[in-house]
Amino acid sequence: MSKFVRSSKYRHVFGTAPKKENAFDGVKVSRSAWDSNKVKCNPKYVGVQWESGGGGAVAILNVEKTGKQSPNLPLISGHKGSVLDLSFSPHNDQMVATVSEDTTVKLWQIPEGGLTENMNEATQTLTAHRKKVGTCVWNPVASNILATTSSDNCAKVWDVEAGKEIVSNTNDFPDLMNDTAWNRNGSLLAVACKDKQLRVWDPRQNSVAQTCSPHPGVKGFRVVYMGKPAERIFTVGFSKSAERQYALWDPKDMSKPIVQQSIDNASGMIMPFYDEDSSVMFLAGKGDGNVRYYEVAEDQIFYLSEFKSSSSQNGMGYMPKRGCDTTKCEIARLYKATSNVIEPIPMCVPRKGDQFQDDLYPDTASHEAALTGADWASGKDVDGPKLISMEPGKANLGSGAVSFSAKAEESVASLKARISELEKQLAEKDARIAELEK
């Protein structure tokens, strides 16, 4: 990490703690010891792994409905065991995947506007894992392609629309997988394993392309696959002396790190979040009250500053760029979770005036998929996600709720309600016909 002051438009990025009415108060964030971020978000919703008395539950909070939350908040509650991870589809803001101790992967179609009642019936349930499923991550370019890992030491890639697995690997992962990340064009998956090995897996060839030992500490590590300013892999973990550290790797030659740097001696796992548009990396440690951020060059990492808070976080969510507020020069937004509050933390660049700052907002990843799932499975590649302008009025940054088939878009509950209504209409017509025949 370079300490000298250098010229950068992100030198003075600052975070702002929200007022109480702008936070989600009265939430019940899961106390599970499983290492997950506990919070995920998209431009419409904040998903929270919920602390429930039995089974597994997820709350879907509307990003605009902050303040004190109802004690009877409707939940997704279809799992029989604790939810260990969740992930919103990058191509459909109404679709969320959940994985659980009950060994299942479930897909949920959120009603437009959010939940108004508990949702117990999933749109799709995937059941090929034999033990608890710990991670799920969507392909960034291909519609309806989801990767999951399980305690059965198996990594799978699914076509969730068809409800079938495309590939399954039980040979290359001899231990628990703690974290997974797709590369920018969705062709490779970086997998962080409990055996201290980082493996770059090519799922369509079902082979490991690269491997290394990024951090020797016993507590595990996290991974981010970066596409800009160059293709790199960023890891955070622990040294032998239990110091927290980060490292930067070239995925074409992982014999040694490009950069490796100690951070501090704290004990909490660091949750990394990367904004490819600005090349800024945010590091939020569990149990910390601060968030550090760095600017990443091709082969260097420069410390910028940190957001400080008196309350410690046990989870963190990260808003996709198309959900940021350009009128406030917001380049990122984090959602900090404590035991009963989730606080949005906007990260802004200080600028005068209210004009669109095009140097801060290059075209960003769109909600439209660049490939169909079938094209991806057949081996087709693209350079990366489709891009979209952030300038107000120039493009639709909206929901992308078009990528799941019409059959899958309706939940079982909504189908039953529609059938009941049709049966009622049919009975009324039969009654009218009977009256006319008299």
Image: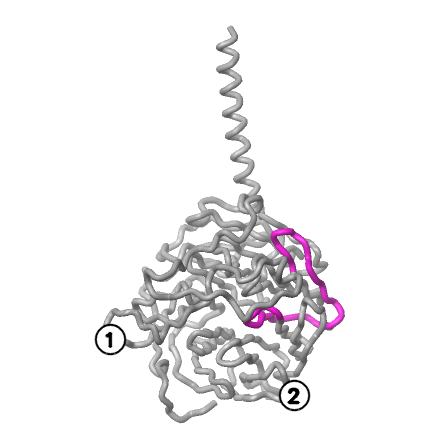
Name the residue furthest top.
438
| Left or right for 423, reference 394 | right
Query: Can the viewer see residue 48 in this picture?
Result: no
Residue 140 on image: x %, y %: 54, 65
Residue 327 on image: x %, y %: 30, 67
Element type where label 2 sits in the image:
loop
Q: Which residues are magenta?
A: 158-187
Relative to 212, residue 108 above or below: above
Residue at figure coordinates x 43%, y 80% from the top left? 293
> Which amino acid, mark 2?
Ser
Q: Residues within 10 Å of mark 2 (few under 14, many from 20)?
A: some
Relative to 272, residue 87 above or below: above
Circle 2 sits on which residue? 255
The part of the image, by quadrant, that contains residue 173 is bottom right
Relative to 183, residue 102 above or below: above
Circle 1 sits on which residue? 352
Name the residue furthest right.
171
